[in-house]
Image (cartoon, rainbow, N blue to C red):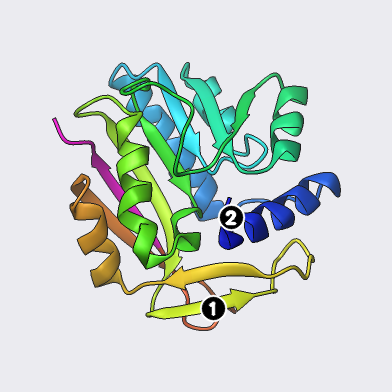
């Protein structure tokens, strides 16, 4: 585990230990509900959530008849998920413990902004590897400008540094398009968070 992953794990283990996971925004909840409903209607019956936290999004997928499996750095998040009768596997984004094409869809929110530029393609490649060809995916990540920062701000109230590599919309699109067929993108502005933006990419894995 490298320095950045160790730093992130320290933060998310502390968040899990104190049960400080922030609630999702209304837009994030709506995105999850809409996505789960659409995928269910298309016959999708399983999803992998990479960077899942304590199975934060499981309810909308399970409620839509989609089997949910998460992967997260923090063992504490896996324990909390177990209390909810959900599976979250402790794992690094760069070595997911699943066979090729194991899942019919992929979901990852607020994870890829922590990945440095020199490993971002590696992360996308590993994410795509565990999802079947031509399967739907949805990714959300913070961006808005090109900046590398170590930030101790968090809505959880914890003051532990986390590594962020923010990217412009154009760079996020360019990176994602190297690994996915992009069907749709959204940008959400965030009131009170400087000029950060939340970028949502909807698409599918290559066939």
Q: What element carries label 2?
A: helix
Q: Which of 31 and 9 is in front in this view?
A: 9
* Outermost bottom residue: 194
Tell me if residue 200 is in the magenta stretch: yes
Q: What stretch is highlighted in magenta?
A: 199-207
Tell me if residue 37 is in the magenta stretch: no
Q: Which residue is drawn at 44% across and 24% down?
A: 98
Q: Distance between the residues labelled 1 and 2?
A: 15 Å
Residue 205 image position (x, y, % from top left): 23, 36
- Say whether residue 45 is visible: yes
Closer to the eye: label 1 or 2: 2
- Say whether residue 22 is visible: no
Residue 52 image position (x, y, % from top left): 57, 40
Drawn side of residue 74 relative to residue 101, left or right: right
In the rendered image, which quarter is residue 51 located in? Answer: top right
Drawn side of residue 12 relative to residue 189, left or right: right
Q: Residue at x 31, y 22 (%)?
A: 101
Q: Which residue is drawn at 31% across and 32% down?
A: 129
Kindly identify which residue carries mark 2: 5
Q: Which of 160 and 45 is in front in this view?
A: 160
* Outermost left residue: 207
Q: Is the magenta stretch mostly helix, strand or loop?
A: strand
In the rendered image, which quarter is residue 39 located in? Answer: top left
Quarter that holds the C terminus = top left
Q: Residue at x 21, y 27 (%)?
A: 133
State whether residue 119 is above or below residue 99: below
């Amino acid at each position: 585990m490298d320095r950045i992953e160790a730093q992130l794990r320290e933060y998310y283990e502390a968040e899990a230990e104190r049960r400080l996971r922030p609630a999702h925004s209304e837009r994030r909840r709506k995105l999850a509900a809409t996505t789960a409903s659409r995928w269910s209607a298309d016959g999708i019956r399983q999803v992998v959530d990479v960077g899942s936290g304590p199975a934060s999004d499981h309810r909308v997928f399970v409620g839509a008849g989609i089997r949910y499996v998460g992967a997260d750095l923090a063992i504490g998040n896996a324990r909390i998920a177990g209390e909810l009768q959900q599976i979250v596997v402790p794992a690094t984004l760069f070595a997911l413990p699943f066979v090729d094409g194991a899942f019919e869809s992929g979901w990852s929110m607020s994870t890829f902004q922590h990945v440095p530029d020199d490993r971002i393609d590696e992360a996308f490649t590993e994410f795509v590897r565990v999802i079947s060809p031509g399967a739907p995916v949805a990714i959300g990540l913070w961006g808005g400008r090109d900046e590398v920062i170590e930030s101790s701000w968090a809505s959880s109230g914890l003051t532990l540094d986390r590594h962020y590599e923010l990217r412009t919309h154009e760079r996020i699109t360019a990176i994602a398009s190297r690994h996915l067929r992009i069907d749709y993108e959204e940008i959400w502005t965030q009131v009170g968070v400087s000029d950060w933006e939340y970028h949502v990419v909807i698409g599918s894995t290559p066939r």
